[in-house]
Amino acid sequence: MATTTLGDIAATRPVATTEALRTADGMPLRTKLERSMRMARLRAFFLVAPLLAFIVFSFLVPVGKMLWLGVYEPTFANYMPRTAAALQTWDTRDLPSEETFAIFVDELIAARESRDLGKVASRVNREFSGARSLLTATGRRAADFAGPDAKQALIAHDATWGRTELWQGMTVAARSVTPAFYLNAVDLRLNADGTVRAQDADRRLHLALFWRTLWLSALITGLCLLLGFPVAYLLATLPMRYSNLLMILVLLPFWTSLLVRTTAWIALLQSQGVVNDSLVAIGIISDTNRLSMIYNQAGTVIAMTHILLPFMILPLYSVMKTIPPSYMRAARSLGANGFTAFRRVYLPQTVPGIGAGSLLVFILAVGYYITPALVGGQSGQLISNIIAFHMQSTLNWSLAAALGGVLLAGVLILYWTYNRLIGIDNIKLG
Amino acid sequence: MQTRLRQLVFATSAVALAFAAPASASDTLTVVSWGGQYTLSQVEAYHKPFMEQTGIRIISEDYTGDVSTIVAQVRAGNVTWDVVDVELSDAIRLCDEGLLHELDWSMLPPAPDGTPAEEDFIAGALQDCAIATIVWSNIFAYDTTAFETSPTHIADFFDTEAFPGRRGVRKWPKGIMEMALMADGVAPADVYTVLATDEGLNQAFAVLDRIKDDIVWWEAGSQAPQLLADGEVVMTHAYNGRIFGAQLEGAPFEVVWSGQVMDMDLWVIPQGTRNLEAALEFVRFSTDTQRLADQAEWISYGPARQSSFPYVLEEMQPHMPTNPANMDLYIVSDAEFWADRQEEINERFNAWLLN
Amino acid sequence: MTSADAYVRFSGVQKSYDGVTLVVKDLNLDIAPGEFLTMLGPSGSGKTTCLMMLAGFETATHGEIVLDGQPINNVPPHKRNIGMVFQNYALFPHMTVEENLAFPLEVRGMDKADVSRRVRDALNMVQLRQFGARRPAQLSGGQQQRVALARALVFEPKLVLMDEPLGALDKQLREAMQYEIKHLHERLGVTVVYVTHDQSEALTMSNRIAVFNDGVVQQLATPEELYERPSNAFVAQFIGENNRIVGKVREENGQHCDVELPSGELVRALKVNVAGVGTPTLLSLRPERVTVAAEPGSLPNVFEARVQELIYHGDHIRTRVRVCGHDDFIIKVPNRTGHVHLAPGETTMVGWHVEDCRALDAA
């Protein structure tokens, strides 16, 4: 204590003053405050805990699992671990070594016995068409090929075993954690040596579909805005008894099943449908030149615009309702004609509603799949239809997950851009 | 407080149990099929007599061939589909992946004359995990009011000059690819060898290109006759039984058998069903000679057992894919080929659709 | 004022919204250039409708509105060149104060330099120089009010309309703003038409006040005239506080009349608006014009009063007495040095001049 510096004094002083502040029962004020805050915080946490748990289990975990599924496909490595390990050291140019062949035949026998060969075969088949039947057929007689001459025996049994492409395919399949599916989702392919090449021109599909999805979603969003804005304006400005009726009309589609509505559009728009019949009856088009409004892009756009319209109208309406008519009057009294008053005073104030409605419609449109599947024909298919196709028909869930992951990333990028340009806090849903 | 809390916990767990509890096993059986006229024929020929005889209640569900439900149920360990009607290539694929219960053919009843089931069923009808019930066919049908001269050959389907109008096609390469090659003059025996090559695929797509702009794609079997009835198309690729159903209702449709691609539908039992015994019993019951013949009274699909042929009604014969008069130009779908190549051809097919 | 002098002129204006009832019944009103005219009345009296017709947001069902010699019935609002201050200011929330002020100038196609100069001047005028970059939501109520005022004036209109502009402010701020508006008006010489339901506001600011009720102008007069000499019962009651005593005209006597009350007393009053001898009338008497502890004979009207209640108001003591059978007769006793100290229950004499007691229609 002999040497006390100025620094020491400076350091101890504030502590001393805070310690001086105590509550009536002698507890330091800060401790007491923290304690009382902690109770409030705990209570708040317990109130949101059920929702938090619900979101974690019903949303975050599945999404995480899905993203993981897109990079993790362990089938081959699970059932043929030694072959998988041996293939990772292979130079991928000449045929694998005798030893690798021997290991493979051993594991082929084992997989056949444990009835897991089909799973391995299906996995390899994704990389090399025909491998499925080759593996299962070879598996039936696998015992005949065991031994030091496995390589020659296999190639003698079926010349396909002598093709490097097959072994390269197996090498790709053997990697449990693999970018192959994500690459596939953006029209690239993974080579066995880890390099990446472009997908063959006649198999490129996904990028074009992503673009189409984004473009059609943007178009649908634009149409919804165009059609929804006047309706929302009417809703917000009409006297109560008319606006209530109008609101019911806007909400009516919500109370009808999606399938019923989509089917109704089919009945309306098909070439022998109501719209075409009416146009022919009026004489606007001839009977032989009926318009194709369904089973193509037009069908998807029309039906989806209709279905998503309420999601545009409602946020717009809720924002417009908060804009008093006096703003327009003020603008006009200040010398602006009707259009200028609308453009410079009314429209900017509806931007939060436009933002909310557009984001809502756009994101819903990007993920829509029932409607395009039913009325989209071939030109109106969206990326979600391909995802559903891989989920339901080809059972290539890893590719479906990768496509979903790319879509998610795309939407997040758009969201981020939107936030940078307009600001997400500038959004109002009600 | 303590007892209240306990009551609450009890109540919530009771609710949870009520949701989680399996629909009481053994006295019900969920049989899943393709809906419409086809399911109706199964209900009449199989379900009703089975329920009468065993007292087991059958719940009939429809699906569109989306076998991912089976995958999901088996992987989740919560199998609620007990017996499912699937296509052959799917049966093979799912069996390979270990998702189906393996079936012992010896459990199947022999033919009335004592021929063992193994010899009685037609080729390919008995699989490791699946038993066929019917032979159906990809055909094309047309609206008789749309044309002066009737199309008669598979090539007519791909000829919009001679037969103008839109075409309905299933959005799925299997079936239509074979038809396209046959329309282009490839001999039925060579179809799959040709299709296995890139040039063969290009050839098939070239044929499809001729009608691409006129195609209306369908996905569920019942859509095909609907498109035809709505006038949305003048010709459509269809399952022959669906057209037969519409004809029964008086629709002016005609089937062209030239270039038909025969396929089979089979019963499978997903791995891990809780009603395995009843499911096996149902499969056994529904695949005996008489039941298979009975089904052909309700829909124009051929029975998978040779011994059933004589029992099929005389007036149904012209509508059967297996009727010799309908077999001028035909092919039997090669399930092994499709199990191997489906993925690759799908990829090409989807890319072709897009461009 | 002759019609040639009028800057704004309503002639025979009627307005109906539903085709059944008239909201404004035959309005005839001339407003002189540079005048501050207030339309005062309870809600639903038609005053705001008149303002909106003048602004162009409502059309007159019948009659003509003339502005500076031009009939404006068919001129759209943005071509009338009238400044307007709205009840809740209607400042554009997405624009800064400067942008709000620039708006009327920009839509008039004024060049940038002029715009910024005028905006600066307008901000100086309302002493908000340093607030130009803020959004309206970042200003206090009084500041918003001043911005609204500046915006209505920045394009130098000849006529400014104000629709209850001070309604949202607290009492103290409201009074301060009243003076500020009054001074601005005096300085700029614009014509102002001001709508309010607050009579003290009207009295403070106006050159003339038009009192509206039921779609009709009840009285159009200067504040003093209106307060001192209300021409009918409605105006008397609406402007300031008054004691109302019902009676019957007993005798007319030139400027005066004698009114008999139901309790038997006879009151001498100024004859303003009575129908004749024998008809009912309403006597109106301002509480501050009543003298307490009046000597009998010192005033024409002196009566005995019993003190019921005293309420201390600081500058005066509000005294409720029972007089002539009326229990709710109010007297304002000024809190002067040496004023009469009364106590509840006490009896005193109260009296008033004939000129302060006005005999009006018995509405």
Image (cartoon, coloured by chain):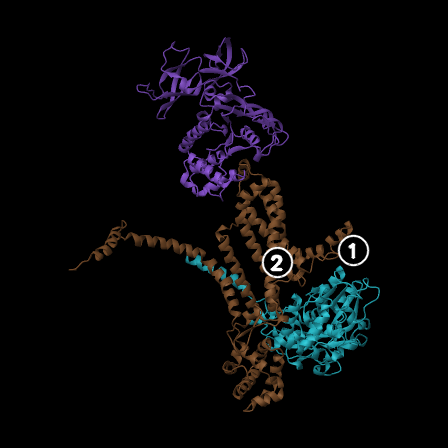
Chain colours: A brown, B cyan, C purple
Q: Is residue B135 visible?
A: no
Q: Tell whether C302 sits left or right of B269.
A: left
> In the picture shown, does residue B299 fall above or below C346?
below
Disc 1 packing (10 Å; few <14; some 14–19; many ≥20): some
| Spatial separation of the CA atoms under disc 2 and disc 1 | 30 Å
Instruction: Check if mark 2's residue and mark 1's residue have beta carbons within 8 Å.
Output: no
Residue B100 place in picture, x, y as percent: 61, 75
Chain hosting mark 2: A
Return the residue at label 1.
A287
Residue that lies at the very extreme toward the left in this rendered image: A2
Looking at the rendered structure, the kind of residue marked 2 is Leu
Looking at the rendered structure, the kind of residue marked 1 is Asp
Residue that lies at the very extreme toward the bottom in this rendered image: A148
Return the residue at label 2.
A216
The residue at the point 62 percent across, 89 percent down is A156
> In the picture shown, does residue C80 fall above or below B65?
above
Residue C54 place in picture, x, y as percent: 56, 30
Give the structural element (helix, strand or loop) at label 1.
helix
Residue that lies at the very extreme toward the top in this rendered image: C253
